Image: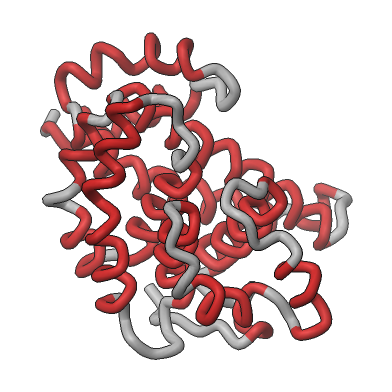
Amino acid sequence: MSETEQIAQALQKYFDNADPNNDEFNARLIQNDLRLYDGKLLWFAPVMIKSGFRSTLDFQIQHRYSLGVTDDEMDNQLVKLGLILLMEYASLFKATDGDGILALTTSLPMMLKIDEDRLTITAYTLATLARSDSLPIVSAINKLKPMLLGFFNQAYNTVYNTSCKIALSYALFQYGQSEPFKSYAVQRLAFPEQRRMLEQRLTPGNLELQLWVAKELIMDIASNGSATSQNGWQRRRD
């Protein structure tokens, strides 16, 4: 078995068994694999998360009639699962206590080149760690902050792959830089009639804003753009 296959197996075991509300348990669950693979787990985890989003949506589409639920209920189920995966990814970051974040500094540019969805997932997760009480994590992310704006400017610079630019701008917003989130993301995250509601949530650390962003990103990635196209989003299809 190749190292890549071993890492995928370790991550599958982690996501199958992790508790999104118990960082200490998750750290114990992954500690042996962290010693073996360290930052590589953080690099490959977004692939597993993206696959989880899409396989869930595929299952819903295939079984939509037998499930006996509405489209809105299916969307809510998808978002709920997506949030669990993202929380477990954040827990994986915490288990590295900053070392894994520093290891990402060399691999994030590659994410930007080969699969912006992976960078979307990573940037959003880094944003959720903004109020961490771990000094090593805060220190590591502070070293990443200058890269985030550069990635925002480099991300496919048209209306395409909007979710990546939104996630990067959201991370910058959470770390004290209100632009470009206010000028770029807000108009894409809400229809005009919803915009005032969204603007009332524009404070770093606001959990309703975090959920609003997460829902849109999850739906965009899971549907390969079809769920968000009505709000003016577009992206390169996989």
Left or right, residue 141 beside residue 174: left
Q: Indicate the position of residue 133 as horizontal and vertical percent values.
A: 44, 26
- Please report the residue visible at 29 percent of the width from the left and 78 percent of the height from the top: 153
Question: Could one spot residue 238 in this view of the protein?
Answer: yes
The image quadrant where one finds the N terminus is top left
Q: Indicate the position of residue 122 as horizontal and vertical percent values.
A: 37, 50
Q: Quadrant of residue 212?
A: bottom right
Work out whether residue 195 or residue 162 is closer to the camera in this orientation and state it. Answer: 195
Left or right, residue 230 beside residue 4: right
Work out whether residue 193 or residue 61 is closer to the camera in this orientation and state it. Answer: 193
Work out whether residue 180 or residue 21 is closer to the camera in this orientation and state it. Answer: 180
Q: Indicate the position of residue 114 as horizontal and vertical percent values.
A: 22, 66
Q: Is residue 236 above or below residue 68?
A: below
Q: Indicate the position of residue 188 as horizontal and vertical percent values.
A: 60, 79
Question: Could one spot residue 17 in this view of the protein?
Answer: no
- Please report the residue visible at 41 percent of the width from the left and 68 percent of the height from the top: 164
Query: Extreme front residue here?
Result: 176
- Please report the residue visible at 49 percent of the width from the left and 53 percent of the height from the top: 174
- Please report the residue visible at 34 percent of the width from the left and 56 percent of the height from the top: 118
